[in-house]
Amino acid sequence: MVAGIIIGCIVLVIIAFVWGSYNSLVKLDERVNEAWSDITVQLKRRADLIPNLVETVKGYTKHESEAIKQVSDARAKMMGARSVSSTAEADKSMLGALSKLMAVSESYPELKADKNFQKLQEELSDTEDKIQAARRFYNAGAKELNTKIKIFPINLFKGFGFKKREYYDVEESEREKVNKAPEVKF
C-alpha cells in the first residue's frame, strides 16, 4: 500500500514536471513570436516611410538617382525578407542605403530645412529606436527559449518538439550603430 502511494506520488510529480515544462516552453515560444511580430511591424513602418522620404529628396536633388535607387532596392529587399537572417541582412542594406541618402542630403540646405523632411527624420529616428528595442526583446526571448530547450531534463524530451530560434544578429560594425542610438541626419 505504501509502495503504491509512493509510486503514485512519483508519477504525479513527473506528470506535473512535464506539464509545467511544456507549458513554460509554449509561453516562451509565444513570447518570441510576439517579439518577432514587433520587429516586423517596426520594419514595415520604416519601409512605409521610405517612399515619402524618397519623394521629398527627389524634389530637391535632381542628380542623386544612385542613392535614391539604393534606398528603393533596399526597401524591396526588406519587404521580401522572410527569415530572421534574411531580415537582418536586408536591415543592414537598408541602414547602409539610408546613410548614403542622408549624406547626400547634407549637400542640400533647402532639403534639410524642409518641414516635411524634418518630420520624416524624426519618425525614422523614432522607428530606429523601436526596432532596436524590439530586436533586444526578440533576442532575449530567443535566448531564454533556446536555453530552456537545451536544459536537462527537458532536452531528454527533445525540447518537446520546439525548435531553436535564430538570433537577430547585427554585424559588429552595425552593432556599434545600434548600441549608440541611431543617427539619421538630414
Image (cartoon, helix red, strand yellow):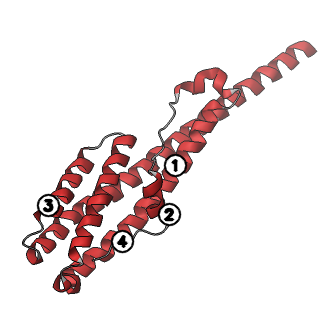
Query: Helix or strand or loop: what does disc 4 sit on?
Result: helix
Q: CA distance from mark 1 to mark 3?
A: 34 Å
Quarter of the figure with residue 13: top right
Position in image of residue 153 (x %, y %): 71, 26
Q: Is 153 on the left-hand or right-hand side of 89? A: right
Compare marks 2 and 4 and give the one earlier in the sequence: 4
Amino acid type assigned to the residue bearing label 4 in the image: Ser
Q: Nearer the viewer, mark 2 or mark 3?
A: 3
Query: Helix or strand or loop: what does disc 2 sit on?
Result: helix
Q: Nearer the viewer, mark 2 or mark 4?
A: 2
Position in image of residue 74 (x %, y %): 23, 53
Amino acid type assigned to the residue bearing label 3 in the image: Glu
Q: CA distance from mark 2 to mark 1?
A: 14 Å
Residue displayed at 12% across by 70% down = 55
Q: To which residue does mark 4 refer?
A: 125
Q: To which residue does mark 2 refer?
A: 179
Q: Residues within 10 Å of mark 2 (few under 14, many from 20)?
A: few
Q: Is 15 on the left-hand or right-hand side of 86? A: right
Quarter of the figure with residue 186: bottom left
Residue displayed at 93% across by 16% down = 2
Position in image of residue 138 (x %, y %): 49, 50
Compare marks 1 and 3 and give the one earlier in the sequence: 3
